[in-house]
């Protein structure tokens, strides 16, 4: 039997790699916040460059102007959303027990011809399950809020990244071998372009689809139209699953007030999703990263299990970067290895 010898360098590399994985696991929230901060810096870097080029402002002063603008816009947006949904959320909370009872009775009556199915439904605690799911969701949001509490740290990282972006970019490229620096430079530029393109496209899509859905539900006279429009905008980032959850919640809640609205609800969501898929996304995603649905859902669940709700929202841009690295580094490497010498 042939004896396999393992060099000391291999052992050292393996031990260091395992230690790095352990450190990364226990400091994963710090790493996530740091990545968000770098992403913020990548997003606002072109704005600082534009202000410096057109108005000749120092990058530090430009960063301060951007920070103040972002804070003011965020306050206006959040204030407007609160004005729209606060009363509806309060009303929904008060009527929740009634909604639960109505939903249980309606679903049970659907299966009166199938006693064995009806028996299973009656034995199933819908209210308890809904409350349990709601508590899980709230816990997820709490976890996200804990992570978002590091937003100040992420914003500071983002501002410093944007102000000193050129220096950081050059030092990062210098970390590669001289023969690989040009390739590394192009890949980093493409990753930054992908992040900016995804963010812009997603923001436009969220605003349009949320507004269209809310407006359609308001015209149809559906209660809590603003809440459902906001949920459509937020959960629309999760392909298929997000919009299905919103439709189910809208129909379920409408059962307790006006079941005749359900066909209109399905029609509105069907039309808006068709417009989004055939018109909005092709326009806003033109030239951007088209993320495959199945890997995206799996990646969202994976990051969500580690970071809660915040991981779900970070998954798409991170997957877009991984996809860029896969296309520009891994695939050419495979082609070179497989081609005859």
Image: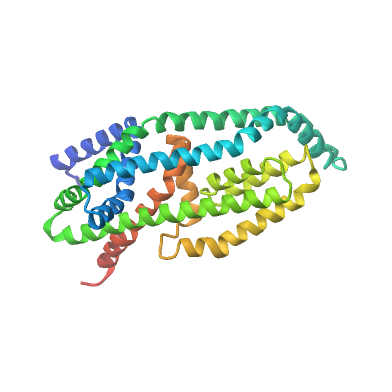
Whether residue 30 can be seen here: no
Residue at far bottom of view: 340
Quarter of the image for the C terminus: give it.
Answer: bottom left
Residue at image x 29%, y 67%?
335
Of residues 52 and 165, which is closer to you in this image?
Answer: 52
Residue 279 point in image, percent of width and height: 55, 64
Residue 188 lies in quadrant: bottom left
Residue at image x 47%, y 61%?
284
As drawn, is 160 to the left or to the right of 39? left
Residue at image x 74%, y 31%?
100
Residue at image x 66%, y 44%?
225
Whether residue 153 can be seen here: yes
Residue 5 lies in quadrant: top left
Residue at far front of view: 55
Q: How many marks?
A: 0
As drawn, is 155 to the left or to the right of 138? left
Residue 37 lies in quadrant: top left
Residue 19 point in image, percent of width and height: 25, 33
Residue at far left of view: 178
Of residues 113 and 198, which is closer to you in this image?
Answer: 198
Of residues 184 and 277, which is closer to you in this image?
Answer: 277
Render colour scheme: rainbow
Residue 312 point in image, percent of width and height: 47, 42
Would you place residue 77 above or below residue 273 in this image? above
Residue 253 point in image, percent of width and height: 72, 39
């Amino acid at each position: 039997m042939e004896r396999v010898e393992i060099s000391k360098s291999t052992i050292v590399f393996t031990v260091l790699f395992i230690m790095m994985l352990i450190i990364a696991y226990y400091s994963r929230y710090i790493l996530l916040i740091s990545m968000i901060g770098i992403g913020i810096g990548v997003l606002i870097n072109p704005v600082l460059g534009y202000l410096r080029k057109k108005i000749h402002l120092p990058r530090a002063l430009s960063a301060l102007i951007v920070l103040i603008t972002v804070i003011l816009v965020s306050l206006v947006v959040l204030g407007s959303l609160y004005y729209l949904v606060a009363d509806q959320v309060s009303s929904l909370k008060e009527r929740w027990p009634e909604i639960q009872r109505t939903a249980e009775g309606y679903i049970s009556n659907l299966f009166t011809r199938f006693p064995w199915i009806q028996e299973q439904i009656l034995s199933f605690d819908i209210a308890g399950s809904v409350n349990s799911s709601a508590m899980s969701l709230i816990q997820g949001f709490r976890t996200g809020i804990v992570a978002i509490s590091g937003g100040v740290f992420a914003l500071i990282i983002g501002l410093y990244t944007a102000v000193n972006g050129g220096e950081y970019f050059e030092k990062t490229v210098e970390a590669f071998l001289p023969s690989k620096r040009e390739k590394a430079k192009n890949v980093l530029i493409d990753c930054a372009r992908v992040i900016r393109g995804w963010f812009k496209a997603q923001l436009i899509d969220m605003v349009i689809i949320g507004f269209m859905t809310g407006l359609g539900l308001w015209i149809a006279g559906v209660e809590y139209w603003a809440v459902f429009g906001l949920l459509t905008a937020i959960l629309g980032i999760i392909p298929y699953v997000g919009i299905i959850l919103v439709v189910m919640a809208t129909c379920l809640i409408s059962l307790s007030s006006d079941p005749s609205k359900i066909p209109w609800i399905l029609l509105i969501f069907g039309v808006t999703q068709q417009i989004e898929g055939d018109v909005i996304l092709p326009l806003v995603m033109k030239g951007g990263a088209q993320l495959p649905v199945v890997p995206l859902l799996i990646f969202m669940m994976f990051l969500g299990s580690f970071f809660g709700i915040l991981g779900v929202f970070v998954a798409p841009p991170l997957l877009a970067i991984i996809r860029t690295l896969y296309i520009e580094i891994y695939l050419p490497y495979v082609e070179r290895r497989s081609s005859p010498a």
